[in-house]
Amino acid sequence: MITGERKTKLSIEAILSRISEYDIFRYYMPHSDWTLNRVTYSPFRNEKNPSFMIGNRLGYLMFVDYSNTSLRGDCFNFVQMMHHLPSTSDTLKKIDKDFGLGLSSGVVTGEYKQIIASYEQPDLQKRFSLIQVKVRKFTQEELAYWNQYHQDIQDLRDNNIYSISEVYLNKQKFLMNDNELRFGYLYEGQYWKIYRPYAENKRHKWMPTNVPITTMEGQENIKNCSVAFINKSKKDYMVMKKIFPCSCAVQNEGLACFSHENVEFLKANSDRQILSFDADDVGVQNSKQITEMFDFEYANVPRQYLAEGIKDWADLVKAHGYKPIEDYLKSKNLL
């Protein structure tokens, strides 16, 4: 039965104003015996041992396939991968049609209301960890660390980087080695990522953090750009924006960083979008996956530097200065 004929612009916001991320995952998961935040069988292949999970990450539903971690992202990424759709636009159109939302056609059926009324919605209240820090003046050792990457104290201030003496996680002191370097990256005036470059356990270099995975830094630089240069870390971003002002940074090389809002922003504010990840196999693999999915391009750090243990722009500028980076960008007709 037709209940309305008001046509609305098809967008992520319009879809999520009528159905939830959970509704989308539930509808397109090929089997029903799955639960949020618990490992289940992957919908991407037949397997004996479950290796797939849809979980609540900082109030957003994300999926990850632990047997192939390139398969991860939000509900829209999931639909696009499951149905091998070429673009975000095609993904939105499919969801619109399957749920009978009528955003494209203006013909709204009651089908989606019947679908979502057949089960209870989970509690997805945002559960951001509380991180509090005590800041201090930069020491000479800390300034020397950043000077290696051609960053001075004004660069640190401009990029909201702080020297920290103590960190409290949910009001409990977070134990760290007193002698290790540690810096606090502040995002949006409220989220912290603690960077410990020489942590004994490399897995703890970025602990703790409560920065949402989809946070994109430097959006103010991406305005009417012919090329948007997308870095995978704050340090690379700080290096690159000195010679390529239309630069921004995501939180890491994973697909989950590229929310549809972020992709739409980049497309709307630049003619070309160029990823620049690490030179290693993981960086190249992630670059290829994301460029194919969103019709981006990529220009990673040249692989020739892997022989020197260099895989990102920060390490390259530390070892050789800016000239090889400038030469590389010129060879790509980007400078």
Image: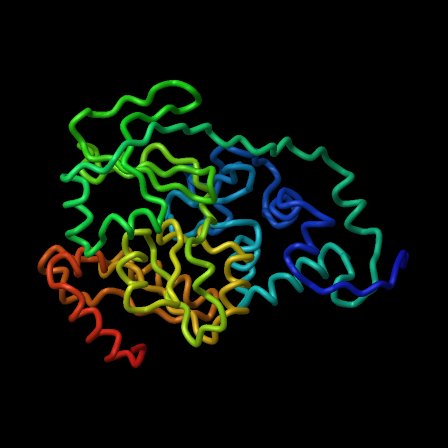
Does 213 sit left or right of 260 as displayed? left
Q: Nearer the viewer, residue 226 or 90?
A: 226
Q: Quadrant of the N terminus?
A: bottom right
Place of residue 328 in the rendered image (x, y in percent of width and height, measured from the top left): 22, 74
* Image quadrant assignment for residue 176: top left
Relative height, residue 286 to residue 214 (above, below): below
Instruction: State left or right for residue 308 relative to residue 101.
Output: left
Foreground residue, 242 or 231? 242
Residue 294: % across, % down = 48, 66
Residue in view at x 87 percent, y 63 percent: 5
What residue do we see at 39% from left, 60% from top?
248
Residue 232 versus residue 283: which sits nearer the camera? Answer: 232
**What is the x, y in percent for residue 69?**
38, 48
Residue 293 picture location, percent across and down: 47, 65
The figure's colour scheme reads rainbow
Give above or below for 144 relative to 163.
below
Is 57 left, or right, of 192 in this rendering?
right
